[in-house]
Image (tube, grey):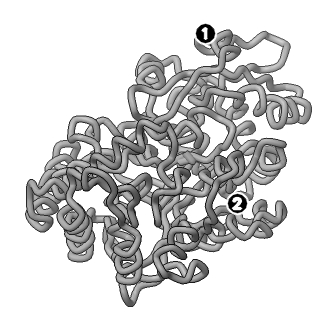
Amino acid sequence: MNNEKSSKGWNRNKLVALPCTATLAITLAISGCSSSNTASSSPGGKSADSNSTQNSSPNASTSKNGPVTIDFWFPWGGDYQKDFKANVVDVFEKEHPNIKVKMTFVETTGQTQASDKLLTAIAGGNPPDVALFDRFLIGSWAAKGSLTDLSSFVKSSGITPDDYYKGLWSEVVYKDKVYALPWGTDNRGMYYNKTLMKEAGLDPNKPPQTIEELDQMAEKIFKKGSGNKYSQVGFIPWMNQGYFYTQAWNWGGKWEDSNHNLTPNDPQNVKALAWMAGYAKKYDIANLTSFSDAMGQTGMNPFWTGKVGFEFDGNWILNDLAKYKLNFDWGVAPMPAAEGNKSVTWAGGWSYVMPKGSKHEQEAWEFIKFVAHKEGTLLWAKRPKAGYDITAMPNVNDEMKLSENPNLKVFLDLMPTAYTRPVSPVGAFLWNEANRVQDLAIHGKGEPQALLDEVKKNVDAELAKIGN
């Protein structure tokens, strides 16, 4: 998301895939994401600000002759409430004296970026007017009628899809209707340890550009120590943001066709999963797990330990790396792609939605339009703690001159062609299924083709249940 990142935390991103029971609990990527100073700006992360709970009541009342008060729910803890109010909400209220905004922290449920409390409020006819919402979930919530169609508001506002990155706009549209405005984004690249490359006899200034080159370079960095355990590793495909989703795109695979039919068993997806399983077999999944556990005990991202050659991760990691003085040289580059394919990335992030049943639709739209379009996006981007965040609007990123940072520029250059996960009523189900078969494949519990054929069957069955 995310963004989706200090709260991503090592505990939620083991080097070796989580057990099936854990991966089935994840309903988003981590995607999603994008704010460096919030505890739940990363996929699934959350931490309530001690000052947030004061606003825990349902919809605010509206006085007869005074300003209309809209209720805005958000799932981010840390300093988000204080910073967002000071940098964005206070400006909005000054420009819109007829509207007051009540900010309410509402935590997400389990290891997801969805809130059961929000769903219950919508079902009970007493929802907030606006919610900060993971874009990945828009398709599934729109399909069950939980979000307000904003198409007419957007049409009369002058806002166009071109104001945002193409992939991000596609995430807020379901069945040709607009259900949100994008806000904040993130994507994935490759971090590489120049020191380990040099020690392995590699040119530290020439990171791998293809998967074949990555495999060859990684092999030279793997090293075993006492007890025949790895003291350092070259690369592990499923480390951190190396989800099967990620690797499928890097192999030239796809998760949906041009007609939006889901294609989990695309031939290139099968090759990607087989490649991941190949690493588990070649380097011994048990030994990789042992290394994973050792890294987990440090409480650090494994890359920061200096014992990992290459790692796929998000731009938010730059915020954390800026806080630490590492004892090795490192760099950032696009993720390598399969031979004959261009480097790609995928983006997650957040949006602003109007839950179905809002009592103050016009005022809620004025707020959404302000915070998620140029003025509000720019105000948030200019805050002191913005760090290496990427906004959903190319023009704002240009105005902020974000590309002047060479490391961040790697991620920015990939945004115009960034993939996003399919907008589907079963998008979260497909994500869980992909994680499930990744776990099975790397543990030698199924052949990639058969596993992905099963995923296709399961996804189609879920769609049939809901009449899609």
Residues at marks 1 and 2, CA–CA distance in whole angstroms: 33 Å
Left or right side of 347 for 287 = left
Which of the 4 quarters of the picture holds residue 415? bottom right
Q: Residue at x 34, y 74 (%)?
A: 219
CB under 8 Å between callouts 1 and 2?
A: no
Q: Nearer the viewer, residue 163 or 421?
A: 421
Residue 376 position within the rendered picture, expressed as x and y whole percent measured from the top left? 79, 45
Q: Residue at x 62, y 49 (%)?
A: 181
Residue 316 position within the rendered picture, expressed as x and y whole percent measured from the top left? 61, 51
Q: Secondary structure at mark 2?
A: loop
Q: Residue at x 40, y 83 (%)?
A: 213
Residue 211 position within the rendered picture, expressed as x and y whole percent measured from the top left? 38, 79
**Sequence-wise first label, 1 or 2:** 1
Which of the 4 quarters of the picture holds residue 66? top right
Bin the neighbour count of mark 2 within 10 Å (Cα to Cα): few under 14, some 14-19, many 20 and up: many
Badge number at residue 154: none
Residue 400 position within the rendered picture, expressed as x and y whole percent measured from the top left? 83, 60
Amino acid marked by disc 2: Met
Badge number at residue 57: 1
Q: Secondary structure at mark 1?
A: loop
Left or right side of 109 for 438 = left
Q: Is residue 8 above or below residue 230?
A: above
Amino acid marked by disc 1: Ser
Bin the neighbour count of mark 1 within 10 Å (Cα to Cα): few under 14, some 14-19, many 20 and up: few
